[in-house]
Amino acid sequence: MTQATTAAPSISLPRVMSFASASIPIQALVLAISVHLPRYFASHVGLELAVVGAAFAMVRLVDIPIDAVLGMAMDRTRSRFGRYRLWLALGTPVLMAGLYLILQADRSTSQLGLAGMLLFLYIGYSMVYLSHLAWGGVLGPTYQQRNRIFGAIIGLGVAGAVAVLLIPIVMERLHYSDGEGVRAMVWFIILALPATALLVLSTTRETLTVESPHKLRLADYAVLLRRGNVLRLLAADLCAILGPGWMAALYLFYFKDSRGFDTAAANVLLMVYIAAGFVGAPCAAWLGNRIGKHRALMTATTIYSLGLILTPFLPAGNFAAFAPCMFVVGAMQTAFVVMIRAITGDIADEIRLENGREWMGLMYALTIGTTKIASGLSALTFVLLQAVGYQARAGAVNTPEAINALQLIYIVGPIVFVMIAGACFIGYRLTPERHAEIRSKLAERDALYGESAAVQGLGASTGEPVVTGP
């Protein structure tokens, strides 16, 4: 059906949570890829470390450009089934097939074969994740609704990450091997994908945004990367992901060798850190609506940094002292991810007002790209550890100087990057008031384009608002 208005009705909490449920398998997959799959291929499938490392590197070389191409393709899609809605529906079976493919890897799998499996997996992941983020950006067009939606998306993503962390623990207690635990994680994601996708598709509508009839040229995309707000967003996203990623890469080394915890206790503290996102996500949405997204982001990055500064002064091996600190730091890390994802949609609105075209998919593709770059750069921490003489092999005895260097690297790196992320929004002018003006002007122009299209009998081909879904 069609509508002649672009007004954004309030979205009920059950529908927000239904829409956000797609982030459960997505974030479970993110954790599995970053933590478990490389080790699974090397330790349990039996592939050479060099083969695994090279295959992941090969895929990363083409993965980021693919995201940009997919984002542009999504923005240009127009169908009665929807724009991002269609891509979510198409991407779900692709991602399921990619996950099934990697379970077929064995000792005979070549480097090129493993890279092909991973590329198929990453394409499906990008189709699902990118379409879900972009759809979330247009689903909640107002400043407040966008905070609420991305708070739910990130919050339920935490549920997926916690669930996938618990699976190998439960499998181990049931006397299954580590490899079987990883395979169970993959099957959990395979089964959760269609369940959550069907829930989203059956409960959520998508309103196709009204667009100017002129077609985008390649030069129009190049101008995007010269915009001040886009550059500050990408820089902030890079640093906001690199800081916690830097910390994660050193986490077990630091908590075992510097802070006196065994592996089990350190993993429980990590669970506290991740689970804190259940609190951090809704608190970020609330604070962003009270003081503005950019101020909420700067508040979260500051508290996060203060929490890290506190950790060297807590009594070594004292779980009760560390747990509250890790909870606060974890909640703040989730908070600034929520704010950056919501700010991305606001900037996409600002750009659409200027040139009349939808940029939501490409904008989220760019931030996904910076996230992937940051994840790769976090591995540089191991180079620094080697440079200061730290021995990472099991059973190695490190000097006090090496452990002190480990502590400095663990603390200073994340603080510097996270504070830069917050500082990127000093002087940011896309305030709640400015965004309200942008949405008002978009609504006026959309109504004008819709009326013009109706007079010409062109309908959706020129951008008359179309609501798809139930």
Image (spheres, rainbow, N blue to C red):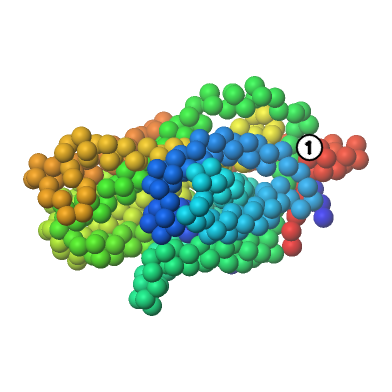
**Of residues 146 and 73, which is closer to you in this image?**
73
Res. 292 image quadrant: top left
Quarter of the rendering occupied by the N terminus = bottom right
The amino acid pointed to by label 1 is Leu
Residue 322 point in image, percent of width and height = 21, 60
- Residue 275 placement, left or right of 68: left
Residue furthest to the bottom: 174
- Residue 42 placement, left or right of 365: left
Residue furthest to the left: 400
Residue 383 point in image, percent of width and height = 27, 36
Residue 320 point in image, percent of width and height = 19, 66
Is disc 1 placed on a helix, strand or loop?
helix
| Pointer 1 residue | 448
- Residue 461 placement, left or right of 39: right
Residue 23 point in image, percent of width and height = 53, 58
Badge 1 crowding class, 10 Å Cα cut-off, few under 14, some 14 to 19, many 20 or more, is some
Observer able to see residue 381 = yes
Residue at the (64%, 29%) spot, across then down: 354
